[in-house]
Image (cartoon, grey):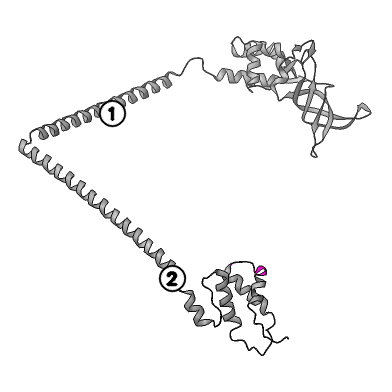
C-alpha cells in the first residue's frame, strides 16, 4: 500500500493514518493525526468544489468567488465537524487558500476572473468536509516523528547529573563559609561583652555621672533657648505695635502741612485716595497753567487717566472728578 499511496495525488484521513503508522512503526489514530494537524505539523486540505465565498479586494469591498478543487485549510475550526444545535446546523467560517474564480452575476457557470489566493466561506453543512493530505506531507511528518528519540540521551543525562552535583557542592561550600562567619561574629560579640563587664565599678559610676551632667546641661540650654525665643517674640509684637501706632499718627498728621503748603484757600481735615489724587492732578496739570488761556486740548482725558493711575479705578468713571478740578475762570476756546 505504501507504493500506492505515493502514486496518489491525495490521501484521505483513514489512508493517512494507516500509512503514517507503517512509516513510523507506531500506533497512530485519527485523533493523534488531528492533533498534529492542529499543532501545525502537517497541512490539511478539503474538497471545496462549488463552495461559495468571498475575499476583500484592495478597495476594501467584498468580491464573490467560488472554490475550484482542493483548498488549503488555514483555520483549524474548518476541520471540526459542525454540531447540530436545536435541530439547526452550526454556521462555520472557513479560511482557505486555493483555486477560485469570480462568477458572472447572472450565470455562475461563466468565469470572469480565475486565480489562486486566500478567500473565506461560510457554510452550514452539518456533516463538515472530509480532510485530505498530500502524500509528500505525510512522508515529511513521518520523518519528523522518527527523528524524536524514544529514550532520553544517556550522555545528556550524565551531563545533567554532573551539573547537579557541581551546583550541590558549590551550595554546600557557601553554606559552610556562612556558618564560619556567623561563629566568628558570635565570638567577637562575646569578647566585647566580657570587656564591658570587666570595667571597674568606679569607672562605670563616673561615666554614669558624666552622662547625667550632660543631660542636665542639655535641659538648661533648652530652657534658656525657649526663654530667648519668647523674649524675641514679645519684642517683635512690641515693635509691630509701635510701628502701627506711628503709621496711624503719621497718616493723621501729614496731610494738613502738605495741603497748607501747596494749596491756598482749601483744606480738608482728613485724607482719602481720591482727594489726594485730585490734589496731585491739580498740581501737575493746572497749577502752572496760564489762566488767561483756554484749557489745552484733551486735558480732561489726560487728567482722568492720571486719576485712574493713582486710584486704580476706571478712567471713564473719574471723568466727573477730572472736570471738578478744572479752574472756573478759564476762557473758552
The N terminus - image quarter: top right
Task: Give residue 248's quadrant in the image.
Answer: bottom left
> Secondary structure beneath disc 2?
helix
Is 239 located above or below residue 188 in the figure? below
Residue segment shown in magenta: 312-317
Residue 312 drawn above or below residue 196? below
**Whether residue 200 can be seen here:** no
Residue 273 drawn at (x, y percent): 55, 69
Which residue, given by chain and number where applicable, does mark 1 sit on?
174
Instruction: Measure the C-alpha gap from mark 1 to mark 2.
Output: 86 Å
Side of 100 where 15 appears, left or right? left
Residue assigned mark 2: 250
Task: Identify which residue is drawn at 57% across, 72% down.
Answer: 275
Is the magenta region chiefly helix, strand or loop?
loop
Q: Which SS class for mark 1?
A: helix
Nearest the camera: 309 or 3? 309
Q: Quadrant of residue 246?
A: bottom left
Amino acid at each position: 500500500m505504501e507504493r500506492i499511496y505515493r502514486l496518489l495525488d491525495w490521501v484521505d484521513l483513514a489512508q493517512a493514518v494507516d500509512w503514517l503508522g507503517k512509516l513510523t512503526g507506531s500506533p497512530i489514530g485519527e485523533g493523534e493525526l488531528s492533533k498534529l494537524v492542529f499543532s501545525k505539523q502537517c497541512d490539511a486540505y478539503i474538497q471545496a468544489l462549488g463552495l461559495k465565498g468571498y475575499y476583500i479586494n484592495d478597495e476594501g469591498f467584498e468580491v464573490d468567488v467560488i472554490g475550484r478543487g482542493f483548498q488549503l485549510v488555514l483555520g483549524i475550526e474548518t476541520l471540526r465537524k459542525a454540531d447540530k444545535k436545536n435541530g439547526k446546523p452550526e454556521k462555520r467560517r472557513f479560511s482557505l487558500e486555493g483555486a477560485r474564480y469570480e462568477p458572472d452575476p447572472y450565470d455562475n457557470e461563466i468565469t470572469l476572473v480565475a486565480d489562486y489566493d486566500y478567500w473565506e466561506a461560510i457554510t452550514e453543512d452539518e456533516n463538515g468536509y472530509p480532510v485530505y493530505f498530500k502524500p509528500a506531507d505525510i512522508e515529511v511528518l513521518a520523518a519528523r516523528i522518527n527523528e524524536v528519540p524514544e529514550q532520553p540521551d544517556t550522555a545528556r543525562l550524565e551531563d545533567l547529573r554532573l551539573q547537579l552535583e557541581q551546583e550541590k557542592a558549590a551550595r554546600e561550600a557557601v553554606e559552610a563559609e556562612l556558618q564560619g562567619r556567623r561563629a566568628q561574629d558570635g565570638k567577637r560579640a562575646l569578647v566585647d561583652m566580657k570587656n564591658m563587664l570587666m570595667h571597674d565599678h568606679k569607672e562605670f559610676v563616673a561615666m554614669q555621672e558624666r552622662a547625667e551632667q550632660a543631660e542636665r546641661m542639655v535641659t538648661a540650654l533648652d530652657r534658656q533657648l525657649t526663654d530667648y525665643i519668647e523674649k524675641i517674640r514679645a519684642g517683635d509684637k512690641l515693635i509691630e505695635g509701635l510701628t502701627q501706632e506711628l503709621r496711624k499718627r503719621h497718616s493723621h498728621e501729614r496731610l494738613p502741612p502738605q495741603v497748607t503748603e501747596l494749596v491756598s484757600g482749601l483744606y480738608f481735615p482728613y485724607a482719602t485716595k481720591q482727594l489726594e489724587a485730585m490734589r496731585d492732578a491739580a498740581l501737575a496739570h493746572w497749577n502752572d497753567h496760564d489762566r488767561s488761556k483756554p484749557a489745552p486740548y484733551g486735558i480732561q482725558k489726560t487728567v482722568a487717566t492720571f486719576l485712574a493711575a493713582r486710584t486704580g479705578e476706571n478712567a471713564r468713571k473719574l471723568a466727573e472728578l477730572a472736570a471738578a478740578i478744572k479752574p472756573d475762570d478759564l476762557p473758552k476756546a
